[in-house]
């Protein structure tokens, strides 16, 4: 899977599972280029979300929902996930 396909899938899943006002997903894979644990085909994503629904929850709970929603992608394609919620 390439990065554009992964971003499209992640965006679609989050939009379908969480009430969002806005979402932006950035590829930050270059940050892990020289790490020993970096694997080809695994990506670092930065997700910026604006969501009244998630803002009502604790940071731990909102991150738990996102991780659960993306569990398959995290297992297969995501090396690192950075989540920022407004």
Image (spheres, rainbow, N blue to C red):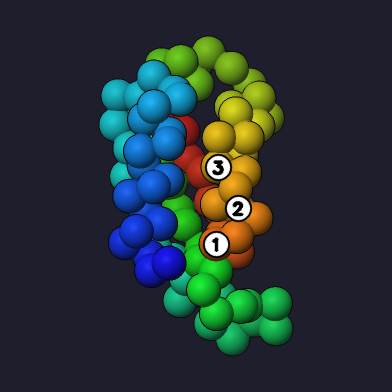
Tag shown at residue 70: 3
- Residue 25 appearing in the image: no
Residue 16 vs residue 82: left or right? left
The C terminus: image quadrant: top left
Residue 12 vs residue 38: left or right? left
**Rendered residue at 55%/80% (across/down):** 40
SS of the residue at dot 2? Answer: helix
Q: Is residue 67 above or below residue 16?
A: below
Position of residue 73 measured from the top left corner of the image (x, y, whole percent)? 55, 52
Residue 72 vs residue 11: left or right? right
Q: Is residue 59 above or below residue 30?
A: above
The N terminus: image quadrant: bottom left
**Rendered residue at 38%/69% (across/down):** 2
Q: Residues within 10 Å of mark 3 (few under 14, many from 20)?
A: some
> How far is the residue under mark 1 from the one under mark 3?
10 Å
Q: Residues within 10 Å of mark 2 (few under 14, many from 20)?
A: some
**Rendered residue at 42%/36% (across/down):** 13
Q: Is residue 79 above or below residue 64?
A: below
Q: Residue at label 2?
A: 74
Q: Residue at label 1?
A: 77
SS of the residue at dot 3? Answer: loop
- Residue 17 appearing in the image: yes
The first of marks 1 and 3 along the sequence is 3
Label 3 with label 2: CB-CB less than 8 Å: yes
């Amino acid at each position: 899977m390439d990065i554009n396909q992964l971003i499209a899938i992640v965006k679609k899943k989050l939009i379908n599972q969480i009430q969002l006002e806005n979402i932006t997903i950035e590829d930050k894979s270059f940050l892990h280029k020289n790490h020993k644990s970096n694997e080809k085909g695994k990506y670092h994503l930065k997700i910026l979300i604006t969501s009244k629904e998630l803002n009502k929850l604790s940071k731990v709970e909102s991150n738990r929902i996102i991780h659960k929603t993306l569990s398959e992608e995290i297992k297969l394609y995501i090396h690192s996930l950075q989540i920022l919620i407004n």
